Amino acid sequence: MTGRLVNAGRGPAQSEPRGGHAAQEPSVTPTPLDSALRKARWRLVPFLMLLYVVAYLDRINVSFAALGMNEELGLSQTAYGLGAGIFFLGYVLFEIPSNLILARVGARVWLSRILISWGLATVALALSAGPASFAILRFLLGVAEAGFFPGVILYLTAWFPLAHRARAVALFMTATPLAGLIGSPLSGWILEMHRIFGLSGWQWLFLLEGLPAVVLGVVLFFRLPSEPGDAVWLTPDERRALTQAIDAERRDIASRHLSGLRHGLWSRAVWTWGFVYFCVVVAMYGLVMWLPQIFAGILGPGEDHPLRVSLLVMTAYACAMGGMVVIGASSDRHGERRWHILGSLGLCLLGMLLLSLGRGVAWALAGASLAAMGIWGAIAPFWGLTTTFLTGQAAAAGIALINSLGNLGGFAGPYAMGFVKAHTGGYSQAFLYIAGLTALAAVPVYLAKRPPRHAA
């Protein structure tokens, strides 16, 4: 023992064993909290991502269906834009009540109901017979899906402390560009099933992409634990450590910020961030609901094969996924949110300007890729920031309200694009309007009060 103590004081060079190899550092045993977070990240986030892939695919598959559906149903550009966007009116009207119900009955029961009902609503879209029925069924799809996204965000706050939340949200939300990445070639392939068993390609699209939500709704009911205390795959120490960390953080937020239902609905901060999210979502759905038609129009008759169009759209989604992962990880690593949001908005602005001013497939692809990278890159730090000042009923109502205000942009974006296209014959002015709105969104982000460093 004495020899070891003497050797330990001689310095690094003399304490090395013979042979010149440095002694190995002792391995660090992860704490129960670290272990619980790692398990939650692997057990929950991939499954939630799968659900959101299906959800987002069922929202945007109408953009590919339009390549054949518009002509068959006699949909004008304005009528298509209305039907594509009216989904979000149904979503917004029922989002806050849906999230409050989820907070009361638990995520497992309510998310399962949401999945099954929106899957059936997507399948029903195959029965559309004209502009009126198409718009009504899209509205009902929005009603059915209302509360899914804010419900998952609320659910993640029960599993991931603030310092780990942006990365979890970023991983979850990579589902949206992943849905485009997978769904673009899948939708192009399904459209090739035109006239099989007498159904049009767009009808097959709604049928085959709606059924997975129904199946996954049943799986979720039996698989998803509502809170850490219900997770059988956590050890008792891990459950205790994670529950204590979340509860302590909630008490801290409640003592310094907003916790009551009234605060969640009427806080100036909630409405301010709701406006920012509105601008982001206008850009998102103004782009994705029209991107297949934009590329098809640039390629021209004879070259606008659905699979070729889908590959171009898929490239933009790949850039969106890369932007979301890199920016979300950077935001967590540096403990900073505001400047990551501002930088992402800058990328979106540049992309929209390229889409407005450029000509040809290369310019359109570059603009769409930059815009998509910025739009999706902003989302993870955005939700990482906005969930730092809400807890309890304020979190359930405030998160839903921010998302509701944002999703009004899901109506405004596609409808404005269709309206401008119908009256000008092109998309340039619409992209300029979106660029202006993106710049406007950056103002409250820049002026926002700087949060504590770990959530800034």
Image: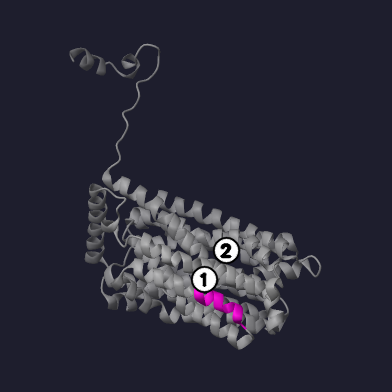
The image position of residue 56, as x and y in percent, is: 52, 67
The image position of residue 85, as x and y in percent, is: 56, 79
Question: Which residue, given by chain and number where applicable, does mark 2 sit on?
Answer: 348
> Is residue 273 in sight in this rendering?
no
Q: Is residue 124 magenta?
A: yes
Mostly what secondary structure, the magenta segment? helix
The image position of residue 450, as x and y in percent, is: 36, 61
- Judge left or right: residue 288 versus residue 344: right
Q: How many marks?
A: 2
Element at label 1: helix
Element at label 2: helix
Q: Which residues are magenta?
A: 120-128
Q: Is residue 398 magenta?
A: no
Given residues 376 and 155, the one toward you in this image is: 155
Given residues 342 and 55, the one toward you in this image is: 55
Question: Which residue, given by chain and number where applicable, does mark 1 sit on?
Answer: 281
Spatial CA span between label 1 and label 2 = 11 Å
